[in-house]
Image (cartoon, rainbow, N blue to C red):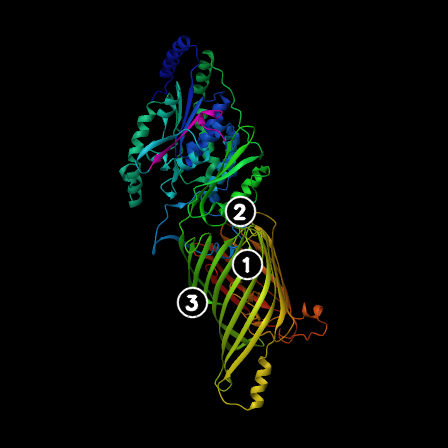
């Protein structure tokens, strides 16, 4: 190490002789080591360097040092980088989370409901290349580095720059000096098994810290005469600190890099090592204090920094504040190209962009387009580059990395309404036909459910889709009288269907659908009352639908709006039955008249609105209208009202009532609630609800006969409270509620994601 005042003075003396000989000022190189979250201390050091008036001529970095170094090389000030680090949502950035708003509308029903998702190779599940795909980091880096789009070399940055990564195939360090700055930053910090590797120029790259965590030689090779090195990593642990298998494994992968860092340190002229004891590489939530530690070491080294500044300026060096590269906000593209796609067609990707090369395009439009493409769930990574051409025109390059074609997904769940189950899902994309998605999903539970469907995108721009499928649902439906369960209806509902819908907007769709419901139900009552053996209701339904979904989360949303509307005509609606005993023709005719069904028109409108009032609390407003123009619609039209969770088809929650307690076709329902998360992962909910079976029927048909189903009345008020937490299995909730017309409390218990 050459950081003593005496040695530094000697170096400056030699440089002064070189200046006179070559008539050029000495060049200052800055080296920023890797270290994960500890690398945010680099920002504090940069602040103190700026206060001393020192701006480097070259910057090299590894891992987090490469990220900070890239931003500094672009012309961001230390204070701007400080603001970025402190305001970043690190939990989001270091995850595979995606805003639910960006998920394709046709994928929303299958998103965010699994605790395990594994790629398949043949018939065998495989482990992924890394836990975190890094799309959120790509988005952030791409936003921050837009000024670099179109540069052919990192030497063209305001401060020439190099990032260091490791070729995992050869085990050698790779110095990245051109190409995409976003990819260079992401590759340099791709910690093996934590982040997926990045492929650049045919090389599979991971974290540069595996081989060259302190890239001093690289900055010397760029032409640096004076090297300032900031080291924020750790050396090898002592044997008494190696107490676990994980400790041994980590140290084993770090040995060569640690020895290399020691050798690189000997090449540094001014060495700074912040005191970061107590901070690990994963302490991203401690950005304030880690940056402060960097400021402290910079303050301690202020005499050396001042001496360096004075000496270099005396030698004729002029330090200049780098000017940040600013990207223009709108572009005319000559061509939009797609690279990286193999099984997914270019037309599918272009169709999701929402623009073409015939009109000017803003950066905001490109951002939204990237979100749309990534939200299809076909890609592990989506990024872009803007390539300059002559005459102020550009090409847009969309860069994608496809996900494996087949995924196995699973989750466990339990609640006291529909009992325990194992949810298994196999999703195959482009295996049956081009630009398609095939889903097999089964809920292995007491109340079995199956969902099999094939979706195929259509048209030149692939902005519509046809979906053919089959749903099966086994239900044990409780039958109540005055709040008391008196019987059970064991139902098996089958639903082959085909639908057509728009897919170009991730937040909205319209379409049409044809269903053929076959519902076979067996009443379970005492033998003395068991007259009906089986009821069969077959309904052919043609409907139109529209959906608008801007919710921010699939489960426990806190902001956004969800609207769904369906209107249709049951042009065939037949009910038949079998009796357990022979009866008189009069009794059989009476049963037939009671169960008789007819064709009907219907609509159902649902709206959920989540209004945030702070970053931890929100109001909930929900409304629902259901109408059929006949009371003889049959089993396939009835909606079960009651329970706490909207986790079952053909039901709607009503806090305070038992699950499926009231079965109606016509009703209006409203809910008002409050949801808060006082501490991370703990959720409290309060809900009031009202339902009326006379509306909207009485408004549409004045001759409509009211259904006094709610304890002899047409309406009911209820409410309750809930407490829960977000677990690795999904939401865990305990609910308690009651209605105005009964003194009985109802309870709800839920563990895991609902199907």
**Rendered image: mark on residue 351:** 2
> Does residue 247 appear left or right of residue 321 in this picture?
left
The image quadrant that residue 410 belongs to is: bottom left
**In the depicted structure, whether residue 222 falls above or below residue 124:** above
Residues rendered magenta in the picture: 150-167
Residue 641 location, quadrant: bottom right
Residue 364, magenta (yes or no): no
Of 617 and 453, the residue lying toward us: 453
Residue 739 is situated, as x and y percent measured from the top left of the image, at 60, 69
Which mark identifies residue 500? 1
Dot 3: element: strand
Of the 4 image quadrants, the one containing the N terminus is: top left
Residue situated furthest front in the rendering? 460
Which of the labelled discs sits on residue 124, or is there none? Answer: none
Q: Nearer the viewer, mark 3 or mark 2?
A: 2
Sequence-earlier tag: 1 or 2: 2
Residue 33 in the image: state x and y as whole percent: 39, 30
Choose mark 3 or mark 1, whichever is in front.
1
Instruction: Look at mark 3 in the image and give the residue it sits on.
Output: 445
Q: Earlier in the sequence, mark 3 or mark 2?
A: 2
Label 1 crowd bin: few (<14), some (14–19), many (20+), radius 10 Å: many
Front position in the image: 307 or 401: 401
């Amino acid at each position: 190490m050459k950081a003593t005042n005496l040695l530094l003075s000697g170096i400056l003396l030699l440089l002064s002789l070189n200046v006179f000989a070559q008539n050029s000022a000495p060049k200052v190189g800055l080296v920023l080591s890797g270290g994960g979250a500890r690398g945010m201390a680099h920002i504090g050091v940069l602040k103190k360097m700026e206060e001393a008036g020192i701006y480097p001529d070259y910057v090299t970095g590894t891992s987090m040092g490469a990220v900070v170094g890239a931003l500094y090389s672009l012309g961001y000030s230390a204070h701007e980088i400080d603001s970025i680090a402190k305001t970043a949502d690190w939990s989001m950035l270091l995850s595979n989370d995606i805003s639910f708003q960006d998920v394709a509308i046709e994928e929303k029903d299958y998103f965010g409901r699994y605790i395990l998702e594994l790629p398949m190779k043949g018939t065998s599940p495989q482990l992924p290349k890394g836990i975190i795909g890094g799309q959120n980091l790509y988005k952030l880096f791409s936003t921050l580095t837009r000024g670099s789009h179109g540069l052919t070399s990192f030497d063209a940055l305001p401060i020439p720059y190099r990032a260091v990564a490791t070729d995992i195939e050869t085990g050698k360090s790779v110095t990245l000096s051109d190409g995409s700055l976003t990819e260079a930053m992401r590759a340099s910090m791709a910690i093996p098994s934590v982040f997926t590797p990045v492929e650049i120029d045919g090389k599979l790259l991971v974290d540069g810290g595996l081989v060259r965590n302190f890239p001093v030689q690289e900055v010397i090779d760029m032409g640096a005469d004076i090297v300032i090195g900031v080291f924020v990593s750790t050396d090898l642990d002592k044997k008494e600190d190696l107490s676990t298998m994980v400790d041994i494994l980590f140290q084993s992968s770090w040995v060569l890099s640690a020895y290399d860092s020691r050798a690189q340190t000997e090449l540094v002229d001014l060495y700074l090592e912040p005191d970061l004891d107590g901070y690990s590489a994963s302490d991203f939530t401690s950005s304030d204090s880690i940056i402060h530690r960097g400021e402290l070491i910079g303050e301690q080294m202020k005499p050396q920094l001042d001496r360096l500044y004075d000496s270099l300026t005396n030698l004729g060096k002029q330090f200049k504040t780098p000017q940040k590269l600013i990207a223009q906000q709108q572009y005319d593209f000559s061509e939009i190209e797609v690279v990286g796609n193999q099984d997914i067609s270019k037309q599918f990707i272009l169709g999701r962009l929402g623009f073409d090369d015939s009109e000017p395009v803003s950066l905001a439009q490109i951002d939204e387009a990237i979100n749309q493409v990534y939200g299809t769930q076909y890609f592990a990574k989506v990024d872009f580059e803007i390539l300059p051409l002559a005459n102020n025109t550009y090409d847009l390059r969309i860069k994608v990395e496809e996900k494996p074609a087949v995924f196995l997904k699973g989750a466990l769940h339990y609640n006291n309404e529909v009992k325990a189950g194992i949810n298994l899902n196999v999703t195959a994309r482009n295996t049956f036909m081009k630009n398609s998605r095939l889903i097999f999903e089964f809920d292995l539970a007491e109340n079995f459910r199956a969902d099999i469907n094939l979706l195929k995108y259509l048209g030149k721009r692939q902005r519509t889709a046809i979906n053919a499928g089959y749903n099966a649902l086994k239900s044990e439906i409780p039958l109540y009288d005055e709040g008391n369960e008196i019987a059970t209806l064991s139902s098996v509902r089958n639903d082959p269907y085909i639908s057509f819908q728009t897919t170009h907007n991730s937040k909205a769709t319209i379409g049409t659908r044809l269903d053929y419901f076959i519902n076979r139900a067996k009443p379970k009552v005492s033998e003395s009352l068991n007259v009906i053996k089986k009821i069969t209701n077959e309904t052919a339904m043609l409907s139109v639908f529209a959906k608008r979904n801007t919710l921010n989360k699939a489960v426990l949303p806190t902001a956004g709006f969800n609207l769904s509307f369906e209107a249709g005509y049951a042009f065939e609606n037949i009910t038949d039955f079998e009796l357990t005993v022979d009866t008189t023709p009069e009794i059989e005719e009476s049963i037939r008249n009671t169960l008789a069904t007819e064709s009907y028109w219907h609509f159902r409108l649902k709206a959920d609105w989540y209004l945030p009032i702070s970053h931890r609390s929100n109001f909930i407003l929900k409304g629902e209208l259901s109408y059929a123009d006949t009371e003889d619609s049959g089993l396939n039209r009835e909606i079960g009202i009651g329970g706490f969770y909207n986790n079952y088809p053909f039901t709607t929650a009503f806090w305070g009532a038992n699950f499926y307690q009231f079965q109606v076709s016509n009703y209006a329902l409203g809910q008002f609630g409050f949801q808060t998360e006082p501490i991370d992962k703990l959720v409290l909910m309060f809900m009031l609800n009202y339902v009326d079976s006379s509306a909207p029927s009485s408004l549409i048909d004045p001759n409509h006969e009211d259904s006094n189903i709610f304890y002899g009345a047409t309406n009911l008020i209820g409410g309750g409270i809930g407490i829960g937490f977000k677990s690795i299995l999904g939401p865990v909730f305990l609910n308690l509620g009651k209605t105005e017309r009964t003194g009985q409390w109802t309870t709800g218990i839920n563990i895991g994601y609902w199907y």
